[in-house]
Image (spheres, rainbow, N blue to C red):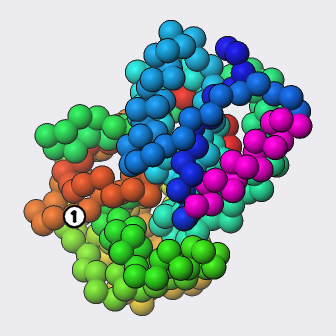
Amino acid sequence: MNGLFFIINPAAGHGRGSKVWGKVKKELERKKISYRSFFTEYPGHAEILARQVATIQNYHLNTIIVVGGEGTMYEVVNGLSSFNNIQIGFIRAGNGNDFLRGVKLHARPVKTIRSILQRLKQPVKLDDLGVFRLEGKKSYYFTESIGIGLDAEVVKVSEEIPLKNLMVMLHMNYFTFIISFFKVFFRYQPVALQVSVDGRMTTYTNVWFITTSALPSHYGKMKGATNEDPADGNLDVTIVRNINRLQLFMLLTFRLVGKRLKSEAIETFRCKAIKVHSESPLLVQADGEIVGEVPVIISVRKSHIALLK
């Protein structure tokens, strides 16, 4: 490999991608590190760029570093899905759509690139990669989580907030999340879901949301399934159900519910694959991007990706 390869989304975070890249670029030049950079021009372009770079490198590509948001990362991961043992670095510059995590505080770009460069000197450790497939469509990959139900609705509404761009410019992204959450929270109705876990079917009633991850993840104040080993070949699933609106609010924001109620409301387990079906339309989000509706099949591709963050 001659130098590093960067895929930059300059529009991420309402133009923050360009500013973040400027800081990263200065650090690379200060350290006299050789690199090549590619800029996205439209939605889906990062996936095409990643596939082209890997192909041109004749399957000898070692590392691509993404500068953008979760959506850009999602595209790059899918662009590299047919290539093995590629390290993907991530320098966050997006708005952040993670459910119940609000808007993550962006790590300092210079500190992040220094950390990534240091990790490149260490042995490659491969982590699991999540896989999902919607009915009638091909398989796609995700790195953070799949959310079904309430969380996906919050993501959808957050993209439609009229003053979102202004809030981004004023660094008030968190208010976008708060507004979106409450707009959805007071009207959303829990649903019945048919869930097949490793081939065994179960019907869950009064479900607020399901989250599934292949890598360590968390959901605000609520402690759900936590994957201690990101390369064990398992999905971690959290189902929240059979709890009223007030109790759910107290659970998600303050964890102020009794142990008994918490144990009854939150079910966590590990599995190799899960299929979720609903009689009514229900949104699905992957890594903070709305990808469609159930039914959806989610599985894991063991030890396939090296994520550097």
Q: Secondary structure at mark 1?
A: loop
- In which image quadrant can residue 282 be found? bottom left
- In which image quadrant can residue 62 be found? top right
- Answer above or below: position of 73 versus 279: above
Q: Is residue 302 shown in magenta?
A: no
The answer to whether residue 20 of the structure is visible from this angle is: yes
Three-letter code, disc 1: Leu
Left or right placement of residue 179 versus residue 34 in this view: left
Residue 28 location (% of width, % of height): 81, 36
- Measuring 76% from the left and 24% from the top, which residue is drawn there? 34
Residue 68 location (% of width, % of height): 57, 50
Residue that lies at the very extreme toward the left in this rendered image = 279
Q: Nearer the viewer, residue 175 or 163?
A: 163
Return the residue at label 1.
282
Is the residue marked by circle 1 packed among few (<14), some (14-19), or many (20+) residues within 10 Å? some
- Measuring 58% from the left and 69% from the top, which residue is drawn there? 103
Left or right placement of residue 247 versus residue 282 in this view: right
Q: Nearer the viewer, residue 109 or 306?
A: 109
Residue 165 location (% of width, % of height): 50, 74
- In which image quadrant can residue 299 be found? top left
- Answer above or below: position of 127 versus 115: above
Q: Which residues are magenta?
A: 15-30
Q: Nearer the viewer, residue 70 or 189?
A: 70
